[in-house]
Amino acid sequence: MMMRVTQQMLHNNTLNQLNRNLSRLNEAQEQVSTGRSINRPSDNPAGTNLALKLRSELAANEQYQQNADSALSWMEMTDGAMNQASNVLHRANELATQAANGTLSDQDREAISKEVDELREQLIDVSNTKFRGKYIFNGEKTDQIPFPTKGVSNAEISELDNTSLQTQVSGAAAIEYSLSAKEVFIGNNGGENVFNVLETLSANLKNNDQSAISDSLKKVEASVDQVLNAWTSLGARQERMEAASSRLKDANTNLQSLQSKTEDADIAEAVMKLKQEEAVYQASLSATARIIQPSLMDFLR
């Protein structure tokens, strides 16, 4: 038995097809206006899942990149401070070597002792270096000045934090980026207290004690080596941090490229599709206008 096709059924089918064409046109317009092939999960469920994973990985990578860049800035400030400390101690070494010469007069050694005192003051200032409002040589106690007085007392030393700061550069890797005052200036594990070394050298110069000055010279030389060793350690960490930063930048570029391929629309293709959908929709409107025309029978029903 043949099914009777009514005018109402014809109208409904025509409108449904028209709405489907309009929906495709809207989708094409949205892709062109946003530049994205995925604007909602229903556009591409598998692509959406991949895009969300890429976004999450990219966000984590960008945070690791910020961590590395921040640590590198801290290291650059520390490197500058270590350079100053090294210069101070090298100058002290020159003065001690000069003072160990038996031909100098009492007045000469007195003048040298005054410069040594100034060098000690300068070294204390270096040890209290701040970066972005934080003291760089006091471990996790970045809000506390390592040596608040020029005396460098045992009480001050006991309050120093020997913790080495570290930052996360991946899900499984963290890199240390700081040096402590104990490591550099006080001498861990039987090292030299460089402030005491300079203070003793100055006193020996004032006393014009030739033998004691020679002993102080050895202490100054050991202090120079101590600072250089810490500086070298910082350089090795800095090199590792720079390598991590470079790797993270490359990873960010690759992730952004993958994200673009997953989410972004091919604009040329999207515009062509938009033109096609516009043509289809206009044709649908024209056809619908001819099909859905009121007749006398429509009014009589």
Image (cartoon, rainbow, N blue to C red):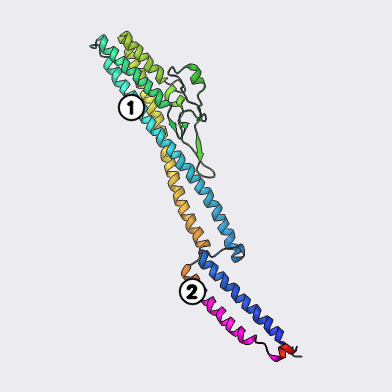
In terms of secondary structure, what is the magenta stretch mainly? helix
Quadrant (top left/top right/bottom left/bottom right) for the N terminus: bottom right
Q: Amino acid at mark 1?
A: Asn
Q: Looking at the figure, which quarter contains the C terminus? A: bottom right
Q: Say whether residue 95 is left or right of residue 7.
A: left
Earlier residue among tags 1 and 2:
1
Residues in magenta, as a range: 271-296
Residue at 63% from the left image edge and 76% from the top image edge: 19
Residue at the right extreme? 1
Q: Position of residue 229 (x, y in %)?
A: 39, 29
| Residue 215 position by quadrant | top left
Report the disc number at residue 78: none
Residue closest to the far left: 103
Mark 1 crowdedness (10 Å alpha carbons): few <14, some 14-19, many ≥20: some
- From the viewer's perspective, is residue 59 above or below residue 84? below
Residue that numbered label 1 is attached to:
87
- Residue 62, image x, y percentages: 50, 48
Q: Position of residue 274 (x, y in %)?
A: 52, 73
Residue that label 2 marks: 272
x 43%, y 39%: residue: 72
Q: Nearer the viewer, residue 28 or 178?
A: 28
Left or right, 13 with reference to 254:
right
Which mark's residue is nearer the viewer, 1 or 2? 2
